[in-house]
Amino acid sequence: MPNVMDLFKGFAPWAPAAGRLIWASIAMAIMLGVTMAVLRRPKPARDATWAEAMAGATWVFAMFFLAYAVIPHEWITFSDQYLKWSADKFVWKQTQSMLGLPWDWPFAFTYQALRDIIVVVVYLVFFGANLALWSLWQKRTVAADGDGAAPATPEKKRTSRFGRPLRRSGGAPVAEA
């Protein structure tokens, strides 16, 4: 399969090496955009079907897979292989003066440590987005059912002591009075 990022080699020589990272980031941005578009729609008044629940679970799994596995892995691979950020390359050493002051840095800081800090920041950003999306998903409004407006809270159903809904002899659930 040809690398489409070779087209950008003229003005971005790092693009072919970061191809999978770029494509994974683009896919994640598209998935987040679709998720935000779905979040704008109100929650349907009916419960989700099994197929809808499985499709949603697969979508969320794909987002988790990109956010917590593919993107961090591809960043580490790109920084190790193309940027050559290893433990023997230093941002600063202990023997360097600290920002022009008369004393030295108390520790050495390698590019490998910088790479790992960037990965941790990626995880924290996605975790924060994860929490925000869960909160937004739970706070969606309920769609109107027919001509009348839907109630703010769904009608409570009476349940048995085992948590199962109570039913009348005709099979319809019993509404709480």
Image (cartoon, rainbow, N blue to C red):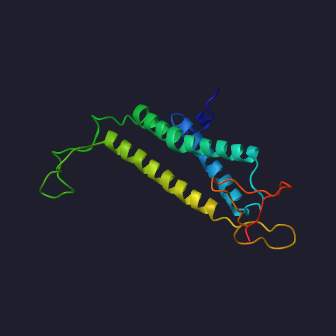
Task: Point out the residue furthest to the front here.
Answer: 169
Residue 170 visible to the viewer: yes
**Is residue 170 left or right of 122 when viewed as pictured?**
right
Q: Judge whether 14 appears above or below 129 on screen.
A: above
Q: Nearer the viewer, residue 101 or 106?
A: 106
Q: Give x and y (percent) for residue 79.
A: 42, 37
Q: Judge whether 3 appears above or below 42 on screen.
A: above
**Quadrant in the picture for residue 102:** bottom left
Residue 14 visible to the viewer: no
**Quadrant in the picture for residue 36:** bottom right
Residue at 64 percent across and 28 percent down: it is 2
Task: Point out the residue furthest to the top here.
Answer: 1
Q: Nearer the viewer, residue 61 or 148?
A: 148
**Is residue 111 left or right of 38 when viewed as pictured?**
left
Q: Nearer the viewer, residue 39 or 150?
A: 150
**Is residue 16 left or right of 113 when viewed as pictured?**
right
Quadrant location, the N terminus: top right
- Please give the count of numbered marks on the rendered protein: 0
